[in-house]
Image (cartoon, helix red, strand yellow):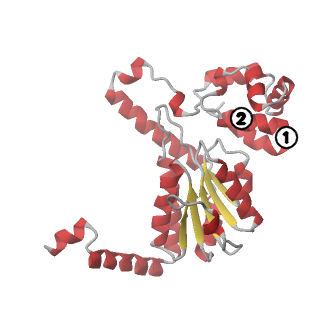
Amino acid sequence: MKKDDYKKRIERNYDQLSMAEKRLADLITSLPGSPIGYSATELAKLAGVSKAITSHLFRALGYESFNEFKDELRRNQNWGSPAFFEFQPSNTHSFDKLTVAHFQQDIQNLQKTLDDFNPKRLEQAVDAIQAARKVYVCGFRNSFMHANYLSRQLILLRDSVIQLPFAGQTIGDDLIDITSRDVLIMIGLRRRVKHVYKLLKLAQKQNTKCLYITDPTATRTAKLATWCYKVEISSDTPFDSYVSTISLLNLICTRLFQRDIENGFKRIHRSESLHHELSELDTYKLRLK
């Protein structure tokens, strides 16, 4: 079995699950740590379902029993919240080994993201971003920095790019004018806040096209987006790896730039001229000396 195969099984079978089974599946994919440390009774209690539902769920996912599921977890190094990992002494003895393992993990994450990548769907999303009246880019917690990065690049390529949330502000006021002519780009990586689901539901209600960039733990929220891309952010350290996330955002901007290179260069040159006029960057100060 591949790493995190149970998450792919949940995603594949999610629509066919009962409400109680979905509640348990949502719990399992969002646990702060691997499910391997929980018994069937404990999972049922945490999800507020009967123990029988636990048995039904794992059979629906293709396992003969809960024990087979646990056996798979033992065979694979499944990951949950990195904060719940304990480093083994052997992992800290050699910085050289740590360095190699670090970059190898990033390479694996990129490869896994590429393996599941659908270029045609991304082209559709880029079409929508290019044609949209406004583009809203939203992210919370660690996803906020990715939303900020993306919005700053999109501003170089088109107008009417709005990043949410604004510091210290609620979101409702900024969504007064959102319509079916707009696009919402939601970045919702693991340990998502409830606002992610609510904003995706709002976009769906308003017939606003939505590009959702998330990770393999997303199940319920993934069903709400027009286009959903799951990037691999696995890590054997206390910190998630965001290499695949930034790579995908870079690809989106590069493809959008290719669509209208002349306009892209005009906006970038205008931005550079303003940097020069305002003496904002050290490179310009050095050039003027």
Which residue appears at 53% of the width and 42% of the height?
Answer: 233
Task: Provide the secondary structure element on which disc 1 rests.
Answer: helix
Establish if 206 lies above or below 229. Answer: below
User: Is residue 78 at least partly visible in the picture?
Assistant: yes
Which residue appears at 64% of the width and 60% of the height?
Answer: 211
| Tag 1 residue | 19
Q: Earlier in the sequence, mark 1 or mark 2?
A: 1
Q: Is residue 11 left or right of residue 112?
A: right
Which residue appears at 51% of the width and 75% of the height?
Answer: 158
Q: Is residue 190 left or right of residue 204?
A: left
Q: Is residue 252 left or right of residue 95?
A: right
Mark 1 neighbour density, 10 Å: few (under 14) some (14–19) many (20 or more): few
Q: Kindly indicate the quadrant of the structure image that contains residue 96.
A: top left
**Outermost residue, left direction?**
289
Percent x, y for residue 111?
Answer: 53, 44
The number of numbered discs placed on residues in the rendered structure image is 2
User: Is residue 247 at least partly visible in the picture?
Assistant: no
Towards the viewer: 27 or 101 = 27
Towards the viewer: 118 or 209 = 209
Alpha-carbon span between mark 1 and mark 2: 12 Å
Towards the viewer: 208 or 118 = 208
Mark 2 neighbour density, 10 Å: few (under 14) some (14–19) many (20 or more): some
Q: Amino acid at mark 1?
A: Met
Percent x, y for residue 112?
Answer: 57, 43
Proximity of marks 1 and 2: CB atoms separated by less than 8 Å: no
Q: Amino acid at mark 2?
A: Leu
| Tag 2 residue | 27
Towards the viewer: 284 or 131 = 284
